[in-house]
Image: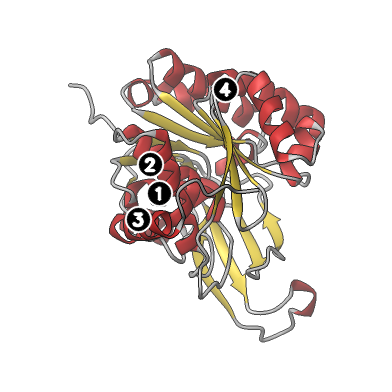
């Protein structure tokens, strides 16, 4: 019997998040910290589920003592864990000190982690899930975990694309994980399969397509084959280029920001979910921008996952506040 069809499946890793209350260089004996669970895949999956999509996580989780609360948290966020594989490895983790202005510091422990064992063999085991899914979300971070993980990202994207599904990809270049040449090679293989490529400028754009200009970056990503490109250009605006129109969208101001970690993942998860559920691109992006703005009120990657009612209300208010013909330089 065929398994359930998911609106969105997310391929990637889940990380144990240790959130420090001070700058990392100031961490000392007795520094307060809180433990939660994050990683770009979980952040995006949580957002997709909150946006109304039936969502599953495709990941490899370890067998250490934190695996039980980790999977419990994933389920609490509304994400199906039925297809998660286990490996006799520890879970990856990171220490985070974050601010709302983008000044975030990270120390990662990923070497020999369970998540890094992701491989094409796992993708083959998930083939029926992938071919039946409305959309896939994955990232350059996932692809950089290991050589096998990179091939898994390509295999999953190809599987969903060939089945007629939508693929969302965030290159998410991390120089501590991979080099520019490898990240560019992966991008060149995945971009032609994507319906939405979400990226940042200048960070990702400079490293991967050699420009600090959002418009030029979007054009270069589209030249690689991406159908629609969303470029975050700072905390307050996003450029959307669907091949017919390249237009800036302003982000609603959050009056009580705490931590911007995971905001981009929240955008990607929300947009992908709403597209899979039948929204137009314009509506999906409006919801994604609103959800991302709301998410920065929480600490850590999944500290604030807005409900879709909250997201839709902010999106509607934001649209009303914009005058007809308003432009976004």
> As displayed, is residue 36 above or below residue 128?
below
For marks 3 and 2, the one nearer the N-term is 2
For marks 4 and 1, the one nearer the N-term is 4
Determine the CA span between mark 3 and mark 2.
10 Å
Determine the CA span between mark 3 and mark 4.
37 Å
Viewer-side residue, 210 vs 169: 210
Q: Tell me whether circle 4 and circle 2 mark residues in contact (CB < 8 Å).
A: no
> Helix, strand or loop at disc 2?
helix
The circle drawn on residue 41 is none
Residue topped by disc 3: 316
**Mark 4 burial class by Cα count in 10 Å: few <14, some 14-19, many 20+:** many
Q: As drawn, which residue projects farthest toward the left?
A: 1
Residue topped by disc 1: 287
In percent of the image, x 67 and y 67: which residue is there? 101
For marks 4 and 2, the one nearer the N-term is 4
Left or right of 37? Residue 218 is right
- Mark 4 vs mark 2, foreground winner is 2
**Mark 3 burial class by Cα count in 10 Å: few <14, some 14-19, many 20+:** some
Residue topped by disc 2: 283
Estimate the x, y position of residue 131 in percent, counting from the top left.
35, 20
In percent of the image, x 63 and y 58: which residue is there? 235
- Mark 1 vs mark 3, foreground winner is 3
In percent of the image, x 32 and y 60: which residue is there? 313
Marks counted in the figure total 4
Determine the CA span between mark 4 and mark 2.
28 Å
């Amino acid at each position: 019997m065929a398994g359930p069809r998911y609106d969105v499946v997310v391929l990637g890793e889940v990380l144990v998040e240790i959130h420090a209350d001070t700058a990392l260089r100031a961490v000392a004996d007795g520094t307060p910290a809180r433990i939660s669970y994050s990683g770009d895949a979980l952040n995006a999956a949580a957002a997709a589920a909150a946006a109304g999509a039936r969502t599953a996580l495709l990941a490899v989780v370890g067998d250490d003592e934190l695996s039980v609360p980790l999977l419990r948290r994933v389920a609490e966020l509304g994400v199906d864990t039925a297809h998660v594989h286990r490996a006799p490895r520890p879970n990856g983790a990171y220490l985070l000190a974050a601010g709302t202005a983008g000044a975030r510091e990270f120390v990662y422990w990923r070497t020999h982690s369970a998540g890094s064992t992701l491989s094409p063999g796992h993708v083959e085991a998930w083939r029926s899930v992938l071919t039946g899914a409305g959309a896939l979300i994955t990232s350059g971070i996932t692809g950089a975990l290991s050589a096998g993980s990179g091939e898994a990202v390509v295999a999953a994207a190809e599987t969903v694309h060939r089945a007629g599904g939508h693929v969302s990809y965030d290159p998410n270049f991390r120089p501590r994980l991979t080099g520019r040449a490898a990240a560019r090679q992966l991008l060149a293989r995945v971009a032609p399969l994507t319906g939405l490529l979400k990226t940042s400028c200048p960070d990702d754009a400079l490293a991967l397509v050699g420009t600090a200009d959002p418009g030029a970056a979007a054009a270069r990503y589209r030249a690689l084959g991406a159908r629609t490109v969303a470029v975050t250009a700072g905390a307050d605006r996003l450029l959307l280029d669907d091949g017919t129109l390249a237009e800036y969208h302003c982000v609603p101001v959050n009056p009580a920001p705490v931590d911007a970690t995971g905001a981009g993942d929240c955008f990607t998860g929300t947009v992908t979910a709403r597209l899979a559920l039948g929204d137009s691109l314009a509506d999906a992006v409006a919801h994604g921008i609103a959800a991302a703005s709301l998410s920065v009120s929480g600490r850590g990657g999944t500290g604030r996952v807005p409900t879709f009612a909250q997201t839709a209300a902010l999106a509607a208010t934001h649209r009303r506040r914009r005058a007809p013909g308003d432009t976004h330089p």
